């Protein structure tokens, strides 16, 4: 596990934070609340808002198609924008894939090199951009490379087998991705309530839960199951701070109910989206290219066409009824979780005393 001195954190967690643990101390944040990678969309301003609120914001990559060099420069602009808007630590999420010769996929390498170059050129940025999250494939050989750069490596998995493999490779943090999550979901089909305990019982590495959490109650439940924190996507997508996305996207999440989602074959495997004309069409057609799917995702996010575009969202959207303000939501979520945990312990202790 990479060790980064506390002095590198520009925003240390306050002593009054209600839920400090090994994860918050490792990252240098106040609350064990992480904003998920939410590509292929711009999340720079949202990431900064989450980091300013005491959580960990994440800058997302633009996509895996088109002119990758131009996409790399675009990612650099996202990183610079986020760094200008926060003094706190933040992450970049990079999907990884591999070529037939075993080397990392070109798009992954382009994005990774862009991030590493940016950090080497700017000491302040290097102190902020302390975490890289990998997803969508196993990051063969990347952990040692990231550690040599002083970077904390988080990796998202969808099965216990992959969690063990990641821990054995030296990954610092494992993100357990439950099948109910929005966007690209694990091929294992394992849901959070089953997957998280399975992973917790097999590895000692800090674990975050992604999928099915939208408030302090979900955070408390994850902590009870042994997680060190949670990563949220859909909940942060429906926020006033998500100003880079078309407002219709958030409205679609607010309007979603139970059964409004479906799973299609996405770019990296199963992908949970809003059930609409676009997703029904992709599910029925079966021959669309990755570029066509990414373009449909952008159509919803940029143009606000939530009927003919793909709206990535988790099942948790069925319980989202309002737009949040991140600066209020993140600390309130931690306080709510702490209160629920304390009340639960008090009830259990009272039952024992009374018995």
Image (spheres, grey):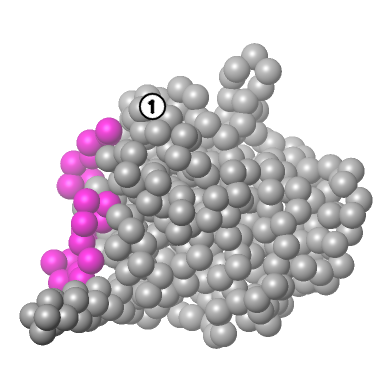
Q: In this view, does 40 lie above or below 221?
A: above
Q: Quadrant of the N terminus?
A: top left
Q: Does the magenta stretch include residue 147?
A: no
Does residue 196 lie above or below 308 as drawn?
Answer: above
- Let me know if residue 18 is in the magenta part: yes
Residue bearing mark 1: 169
Which is nearer the eye, 7 or 229?
Answer: 229
- Extreme residue toward the left, this view: 353
Q: Quadrant of the C terminus?
A: bottom left
Please tell me whether the stretch drawn in magenta is mainly helix, strand or loop. loop
Percent coordinates x, y for residue 95 in the rendering: 58, 40
Of residues 231 and 239, the one drawn nearer to the viewer in this rendering: 231
Position of 75 with respect to 292 (left or right) is left
Q: Which corner quadrant of the image does residue 131 belong to?
A: top left
Residue located 51% across and 60% down the image: 211
- Which portion, as a residue range, is magenta? 1-24
């Amino acid at each position: 596990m990479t060790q980064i001195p506390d002095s590198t954190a520009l925003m240390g967690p306050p002593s009054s934070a209600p839920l400090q643990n090994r994860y918050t101390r490792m990252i240098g944040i106040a609350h064990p609340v992480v904003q998920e990678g939410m590509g292929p969309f711009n999340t720079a301003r949202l990431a900064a808002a989450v980091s300013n609120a005491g959580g960990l914001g994440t800058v997302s990559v633009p996509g895996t198609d088109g002119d990758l060099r131009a996409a790399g420069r675009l990612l650099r602009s996202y990183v610079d924008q986020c760094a200008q808007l926060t003094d706190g630590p933040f992450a970049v999420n990079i999907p990884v894939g591999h070529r037939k010769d075993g080397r990392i996929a070109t798009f992954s390498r382009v994005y990774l090199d862009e991030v590493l170059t940016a950090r080497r050129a700017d000491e302040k940025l290097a102190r902020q951009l302390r975490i890289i999250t990998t997803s969508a494939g196993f990051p063969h050989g990347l952990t040692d490379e990231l550690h040599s750069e002083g970077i904390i490596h988080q990796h998202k998995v969808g099965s216990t087998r992959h969690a063990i493999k990641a821990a054995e490779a030296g990954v610092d943090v494992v993100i357990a991705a439950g099948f109910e999550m929005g966007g690209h979901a694990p091929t294992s089909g394992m849901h959070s309530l089953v997957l998280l305990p399975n992973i917790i019982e097999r590895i000692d590495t800090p674990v975050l839960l992604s999928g099915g959490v939208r408030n302090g109650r979900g955070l408390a439940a994850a902590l009870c199951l042994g997680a060190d924190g949670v990563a949220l996507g859909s909940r942060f997508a429906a926020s006033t701070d998500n100003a880079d996305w078309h407002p219709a996207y958030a409205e679609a999440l607010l309007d979603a109910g139970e059964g409004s989602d479906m799973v299609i074959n996405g770019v990296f495997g199963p992908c949970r989206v809003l059930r609409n004309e676009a997703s029904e069409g992709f599910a029925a057609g079966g021959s669309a290219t990755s570029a066509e799917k990414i373009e449909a995702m952008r159509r919803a996010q940029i143009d606000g066409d939530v009927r003919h575009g793909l709206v990535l969202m988790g099942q948790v959207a069925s319980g989202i009824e309002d737009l949040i303000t991140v600066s209020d939501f993140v600390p309130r979520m931690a306080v709510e979780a702490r209160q629920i945990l304390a009340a639960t312990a008090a009830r259990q202790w009272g039952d024992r005393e009374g018995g």
